[in-house]
Amino acid sequence: MVDIVDSATRSRMMSGIRGRNTKPEILIRSLLHRQGFRFRLDARDLPGRPDIVLPRYRAVVLVHGCFWHGHDCHLFKWPQTRPEFWRDKIGRNRSNDDKVCAALLASGWRVAVVWECALRGANRDIEGVLQRLVEWLKSDAPSFEERG
């Protein structure tokens, strides 16, 4: 299938996609802040620059977009154009996610992954996500994953 816009327009559209301060990330930050949690953002000194770092709990929160991280949910759909490019790209993203989580766990950090589909779409339960995330932060569990 051929792209419906020219390459200059597509480039401009793709450059507008944020790597940080996404809506799901801002939502999680505001929910945690409202509960009294204080955190650092995009810590460059940690593997993978986690979205949210809670040093007091020795925990990080990674907020993954379902498309960019290839989540198997109702929000993810493979692009019709250049399928081999996207399979490679998203496959590398998944592989990188696994490496980052392993490196964080190995260095003594606890890792939570919150997927975009848990915060938007048909299956969202934002208060439930917050409750489970807070319970995990106060526990000793090494990892946590919230799916939609």
Image (cartoon, grey):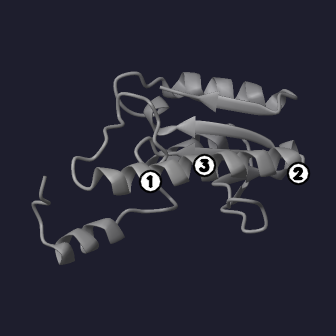
Q: Position of residue 112 (x, y in %)?
A: 69, 38
Q: Which residue is mark 3?
A: 95
Mark 2 → mark 1, Cα distance in angstroms: 28 Å
Pick the front one: 114 or 103:
103
Which quadrant of the structure image shows residue 41?
Answer: bottom right
Tag 3: residue type? Ser
Mark before the other along the chain sequence, 3 or 1: 1
Disc on the earlier residue, 2 or 1: 1
Give the farthest residue toward the bottom. 8
Callout 2 amino acid: Ser
In this picture, residue 97 sits left or right of residue 71 = right
Q: Is residue 30 visible?
A: no
Secondary element under disc 2, as helix, strand or loop, is loop
Residue 146's x, y, as percent? Answer: 59, 29
Within 10 Å of disc 2 (Cα), the crowding (few <14, some 14-19, many 20+) is few
Q: Is residue 17 visible?
A: yes
Q: Which mark is residue 49?
A: none
Above or below: residue 42 compared with residue 131 = below
